Image (tube, grey):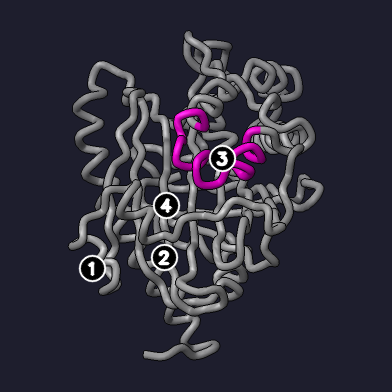
Amino acid sequence: MSLGTMFVALAVVAQAPEQPSSPVVPDARTFLSAKAGFSTEQLANLDRGSPEGAFFESRISTEVAPFGAIRVRVSGDYFLARYRDIAGFKKAKEVVRVGKFSSPPRIEDLEGLTLEPGEINALRKCRPGDCVIKMSDQMIRRLHEEVDWKAPDGATRAMAVYRRLLLDYVTDYLTRGKPALMTYHSRKTPTRLLEQSDAILADSAQLRERFPAFARCIDSFPRDTPPNTEHFVYWSKEAFGFKPVVSITHTIIHSPSKGTIVTASRQLYATHYFIGSLGIAEFAEDEPGSAGAYMMYLNRTRVDLLGSFFGPLIRRIVRGRVLEGMERNLRLVKERLETGYRDGQGIPR
């Protein structure tokens, strides 16, 4: 995902609350003050409709963990309808294409997915430990076995095989959950996404404290799914740095209590840069059924470039751009949602 669109994956589901035995979630304002460390001035800025952001410190040098919040005046039902149209919700200049997988996934779901011509041509040279695109050993092997690179339509066949590999991967993940997460072997040292995903979730203490059942759901998917939960998988192609990034994301949406919605977006795959990502969003209504709410978002993303020799310099640059991008996109999301909500249903001005 791009720096610009990294911070707009906010979701809501308007369903019945869980059973009364579910833990009571502290109100959003208390959380922002006591846990996120927001000052009285920052809370006042939120009340005026401005976004506020900060960084959660990470013990991992390759990880950035920006946190942001903003107030919006929309209902949960409206938010859910907009978010389920993920292609429309993520619409931005950085987003080239978005596609949502069917249930069960079909090869037709990937028809709009393309790699750059130079990337396709470079695939024929891919070997374990040396590849321009992040892939597993199995993906690299199948590309060599199933593509006749000497054929006039070799590039077209390669793209078709690549789509099939991604479809098989998503299907396997939806069946087995996180054990299906691949091991990238595009560089000399393999990167196990399972290890990265587990470590990110283990470091997400606030999630486990506020929503323990949901944290277990993320960890054990597709088992241990609590009531009032839905999910979907989508792919996207987005502008980022020097190369566009094709990624696959699994989003789970859960309502632990009336007026409170929490979502998790786990990155299952990315062609470049990213080696793990988990975005946690919360939509907290002032009162159940009201058209006033806090949106809060924490994204823990690990970037391989931050582990390089120039990692400390890149980190300083990334932190500044990340905060700017987060605030800009939170404003954009707020404007789009509130404008559509007023035009479609009407809210007090």
* Residue 15, image quadrant: bottom right
Closer to the N terminus: mark 3 or mark 4? 3
Q: How many marks?
A: 4
**Residue depicted at x 39% and y 24%:** 304
Whether residues under marks 4 and 1 lie with C-beta atoms below 8 angstroms apart, the answer is: no
Which-is-in-front pick, marks 2 and 3? 2
Closer to the N terminus: mark 2 or mark 3? 3
Amino acid on which the number 3 mark rests in the picture:
Arg
Would residue 141 be counted in the magenta stretch?
no
For label 3, the residue is 266
For label 4, the residue is 297
Which-is-in-front pick, marks 4 and 1? 1
Element on which disc 2 rests: strand
Image vertical order of residue 50 relative to residue 11, above or below: below
Q: Position of residue 320 (x, y in %)?
A: 21, 44
Range shown magenta: 201-219
Element on which disc 3 rests: strand
